[in-house]
């Protein structure tokens, strides 16, 4: 089985005021503006949320967004995700505290995919008062975060078998996506205008979001494509490295991880994972294999690295693996394909059958200090924790849970 993938002066003034207010909020609270968070690694800087409870946490609000695997992006008092309505993919803007729809933006025809699930796979990206979304059929749209008014759009044409799934990466003034083929393996557009800046490679699209990292003082972007991983100079788009990475059905979906001069990749379907040490060769980069194993087989979930250990729900189990060696530390076979975040020394785990669990992030054992069933059905979307609120969803509705310490 293959996976889902997953006007005028007044308006200008309002947009400017909204941007300023969100900037002020960011000083006081932990926003989550894009897929895998502000540091692109699934680690939350927020502290002080509930890690134990006697009574189940309060459901703050819920809303029938319709089918999608789109996670939430949260900035200040607003939360953004996608759903399906009236046979279209729709971008929603919610008030975090009220759960009311502030605006909604239909942007592309619906995606029907009976094997994995229907709807948008990508997560919105919020940056400097604009929201970016990459539709399942290939429309890249930028709208004003204050109103949902369209700023620019661009259409791509090489949709992989289970639809476009990677989200938009904002890198400096660039909006970077991975459309594949003659559109470009990696494509960078001016984030304000949508005009092309650079293109790298022609490999067919995978399902992962472009991933940024800094090595030897330079900034790079990884494109995890259908059959390879390529690395581009983030500023110029010049390709500096490429390695073959073949997975059944060309499903490379998990986020790479960079740490301490090393790059880690993982996929499912019998391929497994590997750690490479980065080096320089003139203007190019080299990758030397450190270890390779099937200890982690992540189909569409991504690993989180905490204090030298990887935590992830792969196709078989929830696992902890030592980063440097690939040594397995613990395995819990009750929770395959679980999504994992790390915050305040704790794992936040959301199982594919809708159970929320919180446990100390330790390589010694997985022992939840709190757990509750929140949803049913297919829960393949990673949760979002921002400002004490946890956002989860299935293929029918989105739910906001209050995990703030004072609730």
Image: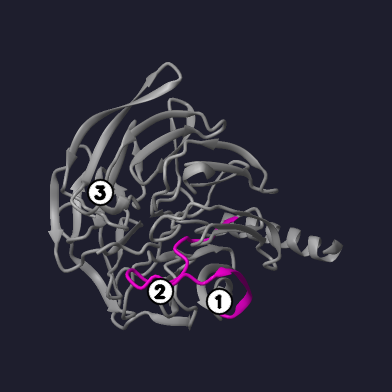
Point out the stretch of residues depicted in magenta.
99-126
Q: In front: mark 1 or mark 2? A: 2
* Discs 1, 2 touching: Cβ within 8 Å: no
Along the line of sight, the residue nearer the viewer: 198 or 102: 198
Quadrant where the N terminus sits is: bottom left
| Residue bearing the label numbered 2 | 393
Q: Is residue 318 left or right of residue 175?
A: left
Residue drawn at x 21%, y 60% is 315
Q: Is residue 281 above or below residue 16?
A: above
Q: Tell me which numbered mark, 3 or 1, is placed earlier along the sequence.
A: 1
In the image, which disc is placed on residue 155? Answer: none
**Label 3, label 1: how far apart the Cα atoms are:** 33 Å
Q: In front: mark 3 or mark 1? A: 3
Residue 327: image x %, image y %?
A: 14, 43
* Majority SS type along the magenta span: loop
| Residue bearing the label numbered 1 | 97
| Residue bearing the label numbered 3 | 310
Helix, strand or loop for disc 1: loop
Q: Is residue 262 above or below residue 64?
A: above
Q: Quadrant of residue 107?
A: bottom right
Q: In this view, does 188 lie to the left or right of 339?
A: right
Characterize the local packing of mark 3: few (<14), some (14-19) or many (20 or more) Cα atoms within 10 angstroms. many
Q: Is residue 403 visible?
A: no
Helix, strand or loop for disc 3: strand
Along the line of sight, the residue nearer the viewer: 86 or 98: 86
Residue drawn at x 53%, y 64% is 74
- Toward the right, the furthest residue is 9
Residue 325: image x %, image y %?
A: 17, 38
Q: Does the magenta stretch include residue 109?
A: yes
């Amino acid at each position: 089985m293959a996976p889902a993938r997953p006007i005028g002066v007044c308006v200008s003034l309002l947009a400017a005021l909204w941007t300023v207010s969100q900037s002020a909020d960011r000083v006081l609270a932990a926003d989550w503006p894009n897929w895998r968070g502000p540091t692109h690694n699934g680690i939350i800087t927020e502290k002080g949320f509930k890690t134990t409870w006697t009574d189940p946490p309060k459901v703050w609000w819920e809303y029938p967004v319709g089918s999608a695997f789109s996670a939430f992006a949260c900035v200040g008092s607003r939360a953004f995700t996608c759903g399906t309505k009236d046979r279209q993919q729709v971008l929603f803007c919610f008030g975090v505290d009220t759960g009311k729809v502030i605006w909604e933006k239909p942007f592309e025809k619906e995606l029907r995919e009976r094997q994995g699930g229907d709807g948008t796979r990508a997560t919105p990206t919020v940056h400097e008062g604009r929201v970016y979304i990459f539709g399942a059929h290939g429309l890249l749209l930028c709208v004003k975060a204050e109103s949902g008014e369209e700023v620019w759009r661009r259409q791509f044409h090489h949709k992989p078998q289970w639809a476009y799934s990677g989200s938009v990466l904002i890198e400096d003034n660039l909006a970077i996506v991975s459309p594949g083929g003659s559109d470009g393996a990696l494509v960078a557009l001016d984030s304000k205008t949508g005009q092309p800046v650079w293109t790298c490679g022609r490999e067919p699209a995978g399902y992962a979001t472009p991933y940024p990292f800094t090595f030897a003082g330079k900034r790079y972007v990884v494109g995890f494509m259908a059959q390879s991983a390529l690395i581009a100079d983030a500023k110029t788009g010049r390709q500096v490295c490429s390695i073959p990475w073949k997975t059944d059905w060309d499903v490379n979906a998990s986020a790479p991880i960079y740490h301490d001069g090393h790059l880690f990749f993982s996929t499912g379907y019998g391929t497994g994972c590997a750690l490479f040490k980065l080096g320089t060769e003139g203007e190019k980069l080299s990758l030397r294999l450190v270890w390779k194993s099937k200890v982690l087989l992540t189909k569409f979930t991504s690993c989180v690295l905490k204090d030298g250990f990887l935590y992830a729900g792969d196709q078989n189990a929830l696992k902890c693996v030592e980063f440097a060696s690939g040594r397995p530390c613990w395995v819990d076979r009750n929770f395959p394909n679980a999504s994992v975040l790390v915050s305040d020394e704790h794992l936040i785990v959301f199982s594919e059958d809708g159970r929320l669990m919180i446990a100390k992030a330790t390589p010694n054992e997985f022992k939840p200090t709190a757990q509750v069933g929140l949803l049913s059905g297919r829960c393949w979307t990673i949760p979002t924790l921002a400002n004490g609120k946890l956002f989860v969803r299935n293929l029918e509705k989105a739910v906001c849970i209050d995990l703030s310490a004072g609730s």
